[in-house]
Image: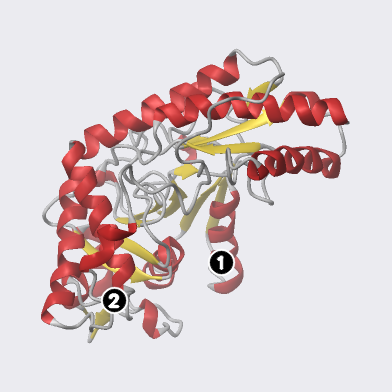
Amino acid sequence: MNIPSIKPHCPNFGSGPTAKHPGWCLDELSQSLVGRSHRSIQGKEKLRKIIELTRSVHQIPDDYRIAIMPGSATGAIESALWSFLGSKNVDVMTFDVFSKLWLIDIIEQLKLDGVQTLSADFGSLPELSNYNPANDLVFTWNGTTSGVSIPNADWIPDNRVGLTICDATSAAFCVDLPWKKLDVTAFSWQKGLGGEAAHGMLILSPRAVERLETYKPSWPLPRIFRLTKDDKVIENIFKGNTINTPSMLCVEDCLMALEWAEMIGGLPALIKRCQENSETIYSWVERTPWLSLMAESRAIASPSSVCIYVTTIQDKEETTQRDFLQSMATLLRQHQAAFDVVNHLYAPPSLRVWSGPTVEVTDLQILTSWLEWAYNQVSTSC
């Protein structure tokens, strides 16, 4: 097979940080408050604007509070786990690498009793009907390492007793999140928005705020996670007064991404781009005999992170499989045709392609030719 003659305009197909939005350039950051305090009038205004644009683009209800958190989605989720859990039994859904990490924290760090694990192998979802709405629930909406996504929230009742705590970091800006079903939601800037890392968002429903003001955990709470003072929510946190010092360069980058999202048509346009992107990869996989999806069905397949098995090597030792995939990745990297297309180390040996809204569908179409070329090159040399 001849080497492809065209390369993707943007060869960044990793699942986080993801490709920058189309048209991005360093000049966009020229208005950032470099060397200025985030607590200055202008600094707080930019942080408030991120909150306002996040609410607008994601169509978040007016009575939900939005905070900018340190530590990306991880910091936002940890703040939620340490602040909200402990008053009720908790159901934890695990079907990818990161949801398993939240389970470990809940059991080994918080040492909670009354934990029910609803688990599934990579490529599958747990039985959603086993969720007990009397309990708190911790779950990941989209598994970037398993290529699987929750298809809807119909299984979460409106009259639930417990809180729902959702890691939506690779679903935000890629799917229409049903906010009335979500009480605590976390995501980062560097997934759906293609923003810079280190910052996360925490979205709280009125029910979540009520929990904060009526329940105090029995364990010490690190200052960086604290959302209350004297049993009241610290309102300033939800008005742009962050718990720690954010990077104003990252803030500017996030603002540019949010403004781009609004310019192209907001959430409906972002979702449409995801659907077109993922369909490009899914259709290619279906007509390529040496590939198969990790997701057991298209009904639960991720719209933003497509995980793919190379079927011709699946009967080999895991080390051999990983060496094969890394050899493909090395060829692609050397030709600057694609970066970061191998799945997470803790996932089964597989390829992974980010198909979020900042990726151009034409680049994904070109990518498939390069993946075929790299596969043939490595297969021939083995």
Please tell me the numbered disc located at residue 284: none
Amino acid on which disc 2 is placed:
Leu
- Compared with 356, 138 (above or below) is below
Residue 203 appears in the picture as rendered: no
Which residue, given by chain and number where applicable, does mark 2 sit on?
Answer: 227
Query: What percent of the width, then of the height, locates residue 88?
Result: 41, 63
Q: Residue furthest front?
A: 5
Please give left or right for residue 6 compared with residue 238 in the image.
right
Residue 134 appears in the picture as rendered: yes
Which residue, given by chain and number where applicable, does mark 1 sit on?
Answer: 105
Q: Secondary structure at mark 1?
A: helix
Q: Residue at x 60, y 41 (%)?
A: 341
Q: How many marks?
A: 2
- Compared with 194, 286 (above or below) is above
Q: Secondary structure at mark 2?
A: loop
Query: What percent of the width, then of the height, locates residue 379?
Result: 81, 27
Quarter of the C terminus within the rendering: top right
Q: Residue at x 86, y 30 (%)?
A: 381
- Compared with 282, 351 (above or below) is below
